[in-house]
């Protein structure tokens, strides 16, 4: 497994645990057969140097860590990491029905603007136009 994939796994694990404790005991929370302790030590050092995590190593173990706000932004796709990080965003759903992943249908903004113009140019009264705009807004 490549370093950028392990970095992503570490970052995602810290992201998932970020509300459970201020500092995560790495030795207890990380079970990664893909990476031995030396590899994980190097990965934590790289992520720490890149300001994606705050990490404190300890003698005889990997130490404690937490994801930084910059790391959260990287996992959520709001910021670009300074080093290569591969984060698996796949979602597995089993034995479920009526499941929606994501924010639903994506609407084309140009079409929405055209509809707003059509509402404005219609012969409807002010109240009817306001109701039409409200319905349109709820769709977007």
Image: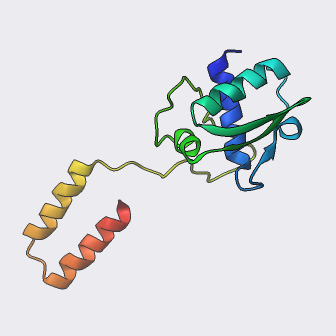
Identify the residue at image location x=32%, y=70%: 135
**In the foreground, 77 or 133:** 77
The quadrant of the rendering that contains the N terminus is top right
Q: Is residue 72 above or below residue 30?
A: below
- Which x, y percent locates residue 123? 8, 75
In the picture, residue 5 is in which quadrant?
top right
- Which x, y percent locates residue 14? 71, 42
Q: How many marks?
A: 0
Asked if residue 6 shows in the view, the reply is: yes
Q: Is residue 79 above or below residue 98?
A: above
Q: Is residue 99 above or below residue 70?
A: below
Identify the residue at image location x=51%, y=31%: 81
The quadrant of the rendering that contains the C terminus is bottom left
Residue positioned most to the front? 59
Identify the residue at image location x=85%, y=31%: 31
Q: Is residue 100 above or below residue 3?
A: below
- Which x, y percent locates residue 57? 79, 33
Asked if residue 36 shows in the view, the reply is: no
Left or right: 84 with respect to 110?
A: right
Left or right: 53 with respect to 78?
A: right
Colour convention of the picture:
rainbow
Identify the residue at image location x=29%, y=66%: 136
**In the foreground, 103 or 8:** 8
């Amino acid at each position: 497994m490549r370093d950028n994939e392990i970095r992503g796994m570490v970052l995602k694990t810290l992201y998932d645990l970020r509300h459970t404790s201020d500092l995560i005991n790495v030795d207890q929370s990380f079970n990664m057969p893909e990476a031995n302790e030396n590899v994980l030590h190097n990965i934590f050092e790289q992520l720490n140097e890149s300001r994606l995590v705050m990490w404190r190593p300890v003698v005889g173990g990997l130490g404690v860590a937490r994801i930084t706000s910059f790391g959260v932004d990287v996992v959520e796709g709001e910021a670009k990491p300074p080093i290569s990080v591969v984060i698996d965003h796949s979602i597995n759903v089993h034995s479920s029905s009526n499941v929606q992943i994501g924010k639903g249908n994506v609407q084309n903004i140009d079409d929405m603007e055209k509809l707003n113009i059509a509402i404005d140019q219609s012969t409807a009264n002010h109240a009817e136009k306001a109701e039409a705009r409200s319905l349109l807004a709820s769709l977007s």
